[in-house]
């Protein structure tokens, strides 16, 4: 529905961009290769079907609109609009959105088909979230999993962020980023260990090396799960 | 008939006036939803039959809610030419009486009458009712505290007119504004007028209404819509319902004016389906308006056409958000849309749309009628006009009120609402529902306005005002609201859908005793992110209840996560029964009452002694906070817990059984205790049981402290005191009486010689008046001590006691017993503000003591070097403070009271002589400072408790401190918590056979000596329960600690 | 199963909504009001007659809690869980009702006499705590008098059975 001839200029991250009326900020950003992450956005959706649901594409309105965060996929361009795509406020908000989504996410990395190409793991790395285990970054998942080769890898219960350095080289994860403090993730990890036939003592001993002060939660979950 | 000329309106108005002021006696029923719920409909049915049966020539009509929900059901009687008289809390029997004497006999029944309507109580200028006469002896409406501060603009017709009669609305000036606007004003003029009035949206956000109209007016579009938002979803708010039920036409008129100003031809009213009566009355109102040509094509004789449709909501909170509401009207899932685009440019079906809430619309006609200047004369700053609030929760006069904005909140709560029931303390006022916040008592002097409340973290919101008292747990309140928002979250955006769920999980964890300090931090950071990132208003405000409770009641959160304790006795997982949870010493109340009921007195006494070494003493003098929380009190009256405690102690003593108590093996550590009062003795008791050797240093001749020297024998006989003190000493305590620390031995020396020191020195130095020439006055506590020690006292025959606390009462009653003829007590506030126990005050009066209230000492009258009286300044009761007491204000009057001697008993403070050089390190202002809840002081191995830390407090608090100090000392010295081991030694079963006691059973009362028998000596005044009463009383216990499965 | 009467009712409802813009919600509200619930077969019939896709209708009824997918009991008890009722002890009211009826909110008793629901605010905060049975509101309810309130409805039913 762009009116021919009339153009609007908006400012993204300090630079001016010319755009058509009716476009959204996200449209302009995509066209100019400015990185704004999205989950629920689909280019096939027409204007009024765009939802602003996932809140990942939030940008901060600096001037030319109500100051604060707005979802860029629904924010129409207007003269004088200036937004920031990577301000501290944006960063914190996106970070908490990923964290929240992650809290609902089933961390069954060892049986996940994306084989290391995990959007969550990437997001977690970008936004410094210590919620995902090393498995999420591991390229050897499923058939290549070290646990299935009877090697006690600590990947399922260790914080990611190391880019799965060891497992990429074929070594087992030693747990140097220390143990995840999330019961659900630990539970899934234990399931993987049980399937691999490891004992509680073996796992605890291995985990103690780098997580001696954070072992209590694992012990609690083991007890609840009846893991021996 | 179609109205098209002004005289048509006048004709209709005349008809309506005839209905309002009839020529027959009239019975008027308040039939809003609340009135019907309270039984108004049954009353009306009864009245119909009764009038027919008795052939009484009178008419029956019904009106909406006038706001006095606390007195529902309401019935009014109107005799032609006389004022309407309102009767409250009606029953069929009362109504019969009212009909017979007032409706038929013409004489109002004063005993049931609440008020009379003898002048206009609202801002309506078209009063038609004859108010010339009034009845004597019935308060006028505006003299009721509930109405005195109200300004009724929105509620102008509520409770006055029959909402199902358009003629009555027109008689009260209705539809004149619409007529004026349509015939005489341009749309721009209307918008300017609304802008000038300063009216802001009453639905919550407070956006300026005129501006909103202007946006919509200027938006391009052939079709525009106006919407009335009546999806009042905030729990605790019902003003919209009351307006729609009581005066639907005021909303319709507002919408007509708005539609004309913005150029809209269609209007929608979106009402909650939970309000069936409001929907029905709206339908009737719309139909009548159409019949009169007020709605429809070419209305009121102009070319302007406007129609209104009703759409019913379907029970979703988020549909109160304007974009969600639009989706719902469009017949879709009511999920909010991102803004921009705003509804003013693209709203309902993509057309420019204006949405205002019910109350906003109801204001419009009055603004047009009386002008923006008049409207903006109410209110303050940026909050102009009035606001309707529903004042509910723990409040004496719950109801619907309309007040000018800017009124201090304390005026609303205390003057209009009458304060908190049952003399409980107000904790917070919650405003704005799930999007709002809790305002703590210390901020209650805040003016109620948009900006002011926002600064405190709350919002005005739609106007729900829920009063919460000390029985409310603020963590539970936060959890309640998060349960609400997480369930009502539509699920569209991540922060709200997932974030509220996570927050709720954390709060649930805290409320069940599994929370950690980190959880509190997570709550805070999560709240901040949800506020920033959520899509709509619901999500952006959802964390507010958590944020404000964390801001003002952080200590309650800490208590839940650190001590696993909920002192309001709400979070069920953290306590067994409210009585035990409330007792500072943690006495197992239900346990000993069960033993007592089973006839096992000695065991009952032992259960008491597990947590409190002085059951017989507390059974007489305890302030019994447990009883105020007893759940039985919600059914009829609380259990007489204190009297039962005394009963089982006395019975044990009478039976001569020795007291037995559990102990751990001895430990080779020595503790010094400074002060032999209740706190010091308790500490010794618990420390000895833990195996320590203790030594008590006491400056007086005997142990007991306040219990011996501050409480007269007629309340606490010394043989009881001695018995319980001896039981402690016999555990092996070394006692050094007549040894004053600081004088006979230095504190530093104690610290060197002992492993730990507990300071329980009490507060026993009388506070002076500060008037000059006070050497001639007698300090109250000193006098009590002299009387106790049997010294002869020479005070003359006429004594004046200044003060209103327990000491003042004790002094007065002791003087009566010492033979003084005339004793008078002077207190600067009202009787109900006296800190003394109510029972003691009553007994004191029975014994002939005279009371003077509202006088404050100004100067002493000294003749020949002797005090012969006091000159007092008379006080009057002033405004409420934010704490809910009325402040005494000095008047110009003085009064002189003469006496042979004057006793001052206005309070005590701590005597700091014992501390010597360590004073500066130990004290903060006039008290010893403890640095944590373990009662540690700034000096290593020195602990402190009791009055020296708290200021003058109660015996049970002193005991609790002694217990707490013993535990802390033990943890400090042994490195573990051996109290648990001590408790494990007493493994008892308190099994109960099922008993049917949940019906009304009155509380047993204790007997007292008659006044003339007690004033001649120091015999104990209150007698213990006889066996049968005690058993009956114990039977009443509901055993709240047991779940139903546990009852045998 | 749907009978002719139900079909007729739904036909009438849809007919009455002619001329109303976007009537899906209104149609479903009427079905709920008159037939007591919006069962699967009703939904299918409404979809067939009104032309709304079934998925859209299903989306609506699952969004608004007013709609019930299963037939409710003869009497519906709504326990207000508004703020005023909460601070005045509505939890204990709900708990007592659960005990008396031996069902949880959202369920129906075995004899299909009562359905129990916990609802937001009934708007009678001045009379808290409140419950609503069918269209009648009870204010200042105490746990101890719930038995008597329920009895009002039980007796009527027994009379009908006999």
Image: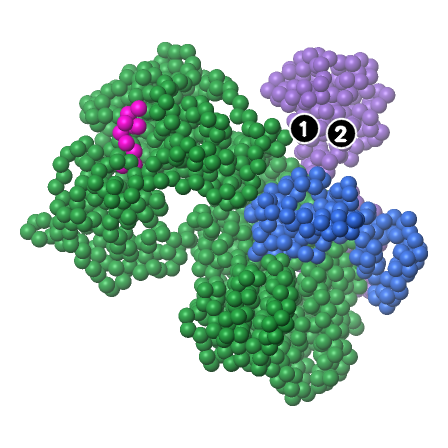
Chain colours: A purple, B green, C blue
Q: Is residue B588 left or right of residue B998?
A: left
Query: Callout 1: residue from which chain?
Result: A
Q: Is residue B679 left or right of residue B590?
A: left
Residue under the point 64% across and 48% down: C148
Marks 2/1: CA–CA distance: 10 Å
Query: Callout 2: residue from which chain?
Result: A
Q: Nearer the viewer, residue B448 or B721?
A: B721
- Say which quarter of the image contains residue A146: top right
**Residue B720 forms part of the magenta stretch:** yes
Q: Quadrant of the C terminus of chain B?
A: top right
Name of the residue lying farthest toward the left: B864
Give the numbered dot on residue A107: 2
The answer to whether one can see residue B367 in this image is no
Residue under the point 43% across and 17% down: B662
Secondary structure state at the residue bearing disc 2: loop
Which residue in the structure is indicated by mark 1? Answer: A182
**Residue B338 forms part of the magenta stretch:** no
Q: Position of residue B154 (x, y in %)?
A: 58, 69
Of callouts 2 and 1, which one flags the residue occurring earlier in the amino acid sequence? 2
Q: Position of residue B810 (x, y in %)?
A: 26, 41
Q: Determine crowd level at label 2: few under 14, some 14-19, many 20+ residues with C-alpha closer than 10 A.
A: many
Residue under the point 48% across and 66% down: B113
What range is drawn magenta here?
A: B714-723
Q: Is residue B760 left or right of residue B118?
A: left
- Say which quarter of the image contains residue B348: bottom right
The answer to whether one can see residue B695 in this image is yes
């Amino acid at each position: 529905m762009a009116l021919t001839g009339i153009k609007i200029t908006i400012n993204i991250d300090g630079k001016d961009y010319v755009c058509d009326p009716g476009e959204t900020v996200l449209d302009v950003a995509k066209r100019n290769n400015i990185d704004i992450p999205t989950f629920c956005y689909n280019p096939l959706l027409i204007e009024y079907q765009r939802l602003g649901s996932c809140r990942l594409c939030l940008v901060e309105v600096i001037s030319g609109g109500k100051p604060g965060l707005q979802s860029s996929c629904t924010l129409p361009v207007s003269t004088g609009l200036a937004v920031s795509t990577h301000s501290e406020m944006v960063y914190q908000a996106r970070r908490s959105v990923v964290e929240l989504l992650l809290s609902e996410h089933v961390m069954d990395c060892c049986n996940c088909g994306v084989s290391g190409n995990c959007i969550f793991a990437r997001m977690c790395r970008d936004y410094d979230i210590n919620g995902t285990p090393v498995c999420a970054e591991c390229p050897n998942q499923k058939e290549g999993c070290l646990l299935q080769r009877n090697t006690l890898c600590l990947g399922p219960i260790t914080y990611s962020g190391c880019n799965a350095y060891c497992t990429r080289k074929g070594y087992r994860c030693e747990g140097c980023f220390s143990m995840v403090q999330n019961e659900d993730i630990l539970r899934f990890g234990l399931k993987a260990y049980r399937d691999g036939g490891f004992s509680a003592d073996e796992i605890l001993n291995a985990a103690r090396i780098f997580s001696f002060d954070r072992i209590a939660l694992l012990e609690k979950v083991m007890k609840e799960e009846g893991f021996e | 008939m179609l109205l098209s000329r002004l005289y048509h309106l006048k004709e209709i108005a005349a008809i309506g006036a005839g209905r309002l002021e009839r020529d027959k006696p009239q019975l008027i029923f308040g039939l809003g939803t609340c009135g019907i719920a309270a039984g108004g409909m049954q009353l009306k049915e009864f009245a119909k039959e009764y009038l027919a049966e008795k052939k009484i020539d009178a008419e029956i009509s019904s009106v909406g809610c006038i706001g006095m929900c606390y007195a529902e059901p309401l019935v009014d009687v109107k005799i032609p030419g006389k004022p309407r008289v309102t009767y409250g809390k009606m029953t069929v029997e009362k109504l019969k009486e009212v009909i017979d004497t007032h409706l038929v006999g013409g004489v109002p029944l004063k005993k049931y009458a609440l008020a009379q309507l003898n002048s206009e109580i609202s801002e309506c200028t078209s009063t038609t009712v004859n108010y010339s006469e009034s009845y004597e002896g019935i308060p006028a409406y505006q003299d009721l505290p509930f109405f005195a501060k109200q300004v009724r603009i929105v509620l102008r017709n509520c409770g006055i007119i029959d909402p199902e009669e358009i003629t009555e609305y027109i008689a009260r000036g209705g539809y004149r504004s619409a007529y004026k606007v349509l015939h005489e004003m341009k749309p721009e003029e209307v918008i300017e007028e609304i802008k000038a009035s300063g009216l802001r949206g009453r639905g919550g956000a407070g956006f300026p209404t005129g501006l909103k109209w202007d946006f919509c007016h200027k938006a391009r579009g052939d079709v525009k819509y106006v919407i009335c938002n009546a999806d009042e979803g905030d729990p605790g708010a019902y003003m919209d319902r009351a307006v729609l039920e009581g005066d639907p036409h005021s909303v319709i008129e507002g919408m007509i004016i708005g539609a004309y100003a913005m150029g809209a031809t269609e209007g929608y009213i979106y009402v909650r389906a939970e309000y069936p009566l409001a929907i029905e009355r709206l339908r009737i109102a719309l139909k009548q308006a159409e019949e009169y040509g007020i709605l429809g094509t070419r209305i009121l004789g102009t070319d302007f056409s406007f129609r209104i449709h009703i759409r019913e909501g379907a029970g979703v909170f988020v549909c109160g958000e304007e974009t969600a509401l639009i989706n719902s009207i469009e017949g879709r899932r009511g999920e909010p849309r991102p803004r921009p685009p705003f509804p003013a440019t693209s709203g309902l079906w993509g057309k420019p749309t204006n949405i205002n809430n019910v109350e906003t619309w109801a204001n419009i006609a009055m603004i047009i009628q009386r002008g923006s200047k008049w409207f903006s004369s109410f209110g303050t700053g940026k909050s102009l006009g009035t606001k309707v609030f529903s004042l509910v929760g723990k409040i004496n006069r719950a109801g619907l009120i309309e007040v000018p904005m800017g009124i201090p909140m304390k005026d609303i709560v205390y003057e209009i609402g009458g304060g908190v029931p049952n003399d409980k303390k107000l904790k917070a006022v919650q405003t704005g529902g799930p999007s709002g916040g809790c305002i703590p008592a210390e901020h209650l002097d805040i003016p109620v306005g948009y900006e002011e409340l926002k600064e405190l973290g709350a919002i005005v919101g739609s106007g729900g005002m829920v009063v919460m008292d000390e029985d409310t747990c603020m963590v539970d309140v936060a959890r309640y609201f998060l349960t609400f928002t997480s369930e009502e979250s539509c699920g569209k955006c991540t922060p709200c859908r997932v974030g509220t769920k996570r927050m709720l999980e954390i709060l649930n964890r805290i409320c069940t005793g599994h929370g950690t300090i980190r959880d509190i931090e997570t709550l805070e950071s999560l709240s901040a992110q949800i506020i920033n990132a959520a899509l709509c208003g619901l999500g952006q405000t959802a964390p507010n209840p958590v944020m404000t409770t964390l801001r003002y009641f952080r200590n309650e959160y800490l208590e839940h996560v650190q001590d696993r304790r909920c002192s309001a006795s709400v979070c069920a997982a953290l306590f067994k029964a409210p009585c035990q949870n409330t007792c500072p010493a943690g006495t197992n109340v239900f346990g000993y009452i069960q033993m007592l009921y089973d006839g096992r007195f000695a065991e009952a006494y032992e259960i008491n002694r597990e947590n409190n070494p002085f059951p017989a003493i507390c059974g007489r003098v305890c302030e019994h906070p447990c009883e105020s929380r007893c759940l039985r009190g919600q059914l009829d009256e609380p259990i007489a817990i204190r009297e039962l405690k005394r009963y089982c102690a006395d019975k044990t003593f009478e039976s001569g059984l020795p007291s037995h108590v559990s102990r751990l093996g001895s430990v080779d550590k020595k503790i010094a205790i400074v002060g032999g009062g209740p706190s010091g003795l308790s500490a010794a008791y618990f420390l000895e049981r833990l195996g320590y050797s203790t030594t008590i240093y006491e400056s007086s001749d005997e142990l007991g402290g306040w219990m011996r020297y501050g409480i007269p024998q007629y309340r606490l006989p010394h043989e009881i005191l001695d018995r319980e003190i001896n039981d402690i000493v016999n555990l092996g305590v070394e006692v050094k009486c007549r040894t004053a620390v600081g004088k006979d031995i230095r504190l530093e020396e104690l610290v060197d010689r002992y492993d730990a020191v507990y300071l329980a020195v009490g507060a026993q130095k009388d506070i002076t008046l500060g008037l000059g020439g006070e050497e001639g006055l007698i300090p109250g506590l000193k006098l009590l001590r002299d009387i106790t020690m049997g010294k002869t006292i020479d005070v003359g025959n006429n004594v004046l006691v200044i003060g209103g606390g327990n000491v003042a009462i004790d002094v007065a009653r002791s003087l009566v017993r010492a033979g003084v003829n005339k004793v008078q007590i002077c207190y600067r506030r009202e009787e109900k503000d006296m800190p003394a126990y109510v029972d003691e005050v009553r007994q004191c009066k029975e014994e002939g003591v005279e009371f003077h209230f509202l006088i404050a000492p100004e100067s002493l009258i000294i003749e020949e070097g002797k005090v012969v009286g006091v000159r007092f300044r008379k006080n009057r009761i002033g405004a409420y403070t934010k704490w809910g007491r009325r402040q005494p204000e000095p008047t110009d009057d003085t009064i002189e009271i003469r006496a042979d001697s004057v006793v001052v008993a206005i309070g005590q403070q701590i005597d700091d002589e014992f501390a010597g050089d360590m004073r500066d390190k130990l004290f903060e202002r006039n008290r010893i400072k403890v640095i944590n809840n373990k009662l540690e002081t700034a000096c290593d191995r020195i602990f402190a408790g009791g009055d020296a830390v708290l200021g003058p407090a109660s015996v049970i608090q002193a005991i609790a401190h002694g217990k707490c100090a013993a535990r802390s000392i033990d943890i400090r010295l042994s490195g573990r918590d051996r109290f648990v081991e001590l408790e494990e030694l007493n493994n008892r079963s308190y099994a109960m056979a099922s008993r049917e006691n949940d019906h009304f059973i009155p509380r047993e009362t204790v007997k007292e000596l008659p006044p003339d028998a007690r004033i001649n000596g120091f015999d104990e005044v209150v007698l213990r329960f006889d066996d049968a009463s005690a058993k009956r009383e114990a039977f009443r216990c509901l055993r709240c600690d047991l779940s139903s499965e546990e009852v045998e | 199963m749907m009978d002719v009467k139900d079909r007729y009712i739904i036909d009438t409802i849809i007919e009455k909504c002619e001329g109303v813009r976007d009537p899906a919600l209104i149609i479903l509200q009427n079905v709920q009001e008159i037939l007591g619930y919006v069962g699967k077969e009703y939904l299918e019939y409404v979809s067939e007659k009104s032309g709304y896709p079934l998925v859209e209708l299903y989306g609506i009824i699952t969004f608004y809690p007013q709609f019930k997918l299963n037939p409710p009991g003869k009497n519906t008890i709504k326990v207000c869980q508004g703020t005023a009722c909460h601070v005045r002890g509505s939890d204990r009211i709900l708990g007592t009702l659960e005990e008396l009826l031996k069902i949880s909110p959202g369920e129906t008793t075995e004899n299909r006499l009562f359905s129990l629901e916990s609802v937001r605010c009934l708007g009678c905060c001045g009379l808290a705590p409140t419950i609503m049975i069918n269209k009648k509101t009870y204010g200042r309810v105490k746990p101890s008098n719930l038995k008597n309130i329920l009895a009002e409805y039980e007796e009527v039913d027994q009379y009908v059975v006999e």
